[in-house]
Image: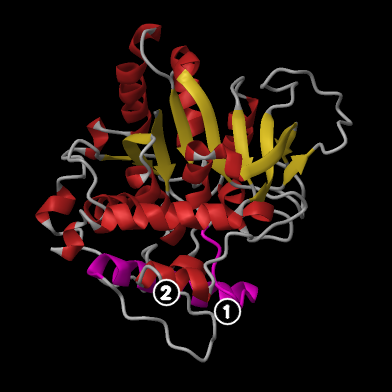
Amino acid sequence: MRYVWLDCDPGHDDATAILLALHIPNITLLGVSTVHGNTSADDTMKNAARCLHAFAAPNSIKVYPGATQPLLRPARFDPEIHGVGGLGGVEGLPSVELEEVRARLPSDPATARAVEGMATAIRGVWKDGTGSKVVLVSSGPMTNIALFSCVHPELLEAVEEIVFMGGGVGLGNRSSAAEFNILCDPEAAQIVLNIPLKKTMIPLNVTHTAIVTRKWHSKVLRPGSAVTDPAQPLPAPQSALRRMLSTLLSFFADAYKAVFGFVDGPPIHDALTIAYVARSELFAGRRLHVDVELTGAHTVGETVVDLWDYLKADDTWGRTGKNCIVTESLNVDGFFELFLDAIARCDKVSPLNQ
């Protein structure tokens, strides 16, 4: 069993990460914190609460709101991809006004912030070294993770690993060189990379292979189907949950087609963070040194990966070492089987189906 804290900015693909974190058997989700990114921090907080309810999270799992802006730079959002509220086009997800959704939110956000939520959860599982370590998962800008590492250095020994979706090797998506999560707060990303702990980076090079094609989309709607012909309609949804997920994937697909020219479907980047924690054997990668470009006129936010060991990095996980496992490939079929299995488990308990 692996204990996970998820820090996210929902976001369509963040929603799929929440679903996986709740419904993969060998993962225990301790809590969810939210951050500025795909939309405002207020909306990411509300979206996370809506997802937790829709995906039948245990009542003990709450949302801990975090940083509303990057460490140094102005906040930037991505309505072109995710809609103004972060979950554009999604139908059937409960309103934040629903009592059960509001129960996931802190009654006083000022007393239940992300950094302290992480610290409390980690202490509760670590038990001063007699318990278990926790995996910190980031599927958004890493402002909260950076702040946690600075405020609670005494708890870093209780962190088993940091897994983050972000960056690219010679590839960007919201600038010519930079991926969105890193571009939003490059200074925070560099702080996290400098932490002397094991880290795993899941870059665009890998997430762009996790495409929800018509075959996989049809299986989301109805298990056992496999529509591949664009002339054929997708099957009718088997449940309200599956219909909601289909609208999520369809909006995301349309955005990726319009903005990036993806014609086969959208990549569900963030779900790969949880898949990695649960089934790292689905991935291949190398341990390398990674830095973030902080001052380049054209390349700020780029993840600079030392593929040829020019720096002669040592064997530590911090500032001078091979600080990151950079994933390079994915067993795509294996990932989607894991994804579909989590949906099937969620489908049995989701309140959307009642």
Could you say where residue 40 lies in the image, as x and y percent from the top left?
Answer: 39, 55
Which numbered circle lies on residue 36? none
Whether residue 124 is situated above or below residue 211 in the rendered picture: above
Q: Indicate yes or no whether the magenta region holds residue 99.
A: no
Could you say where residue 15 lies in the image, as x and y percent from the top left?
Answer: 38, 55
Label 1: element kind: helix
Query: Residue under circle 2?
Result: 225
Three-letter code for the amino acid on which mark 2 is drawn: Ser
- Taking the image as drawn, is residue 72 in sight? no
Quadrant hosting residue 192:
top right
Query: Can you say which quadrant of the picture contains the N terminus?
Result: top left
Could you say where residue 295 lies in the image, as x and y percent from the top left?
Answer: 74, 43
Task: Decide if residue 112 is on the left or right side of residue 341.
Answer: left
Whether residue 213 is situated above or below residue 44 in the rendered picture: below
Label 1: few (<14), some or many (≥20) within 10 Å?
few
Query: Residue under circle 1?
Result: 258
Query: Farthest residue in the left direction?
Result: 99
Query: Which span of residues is magenta-colored?
Result: 239-268
From the viewer's perspective, is the residue at label 2 or at label 1 nearer? 2
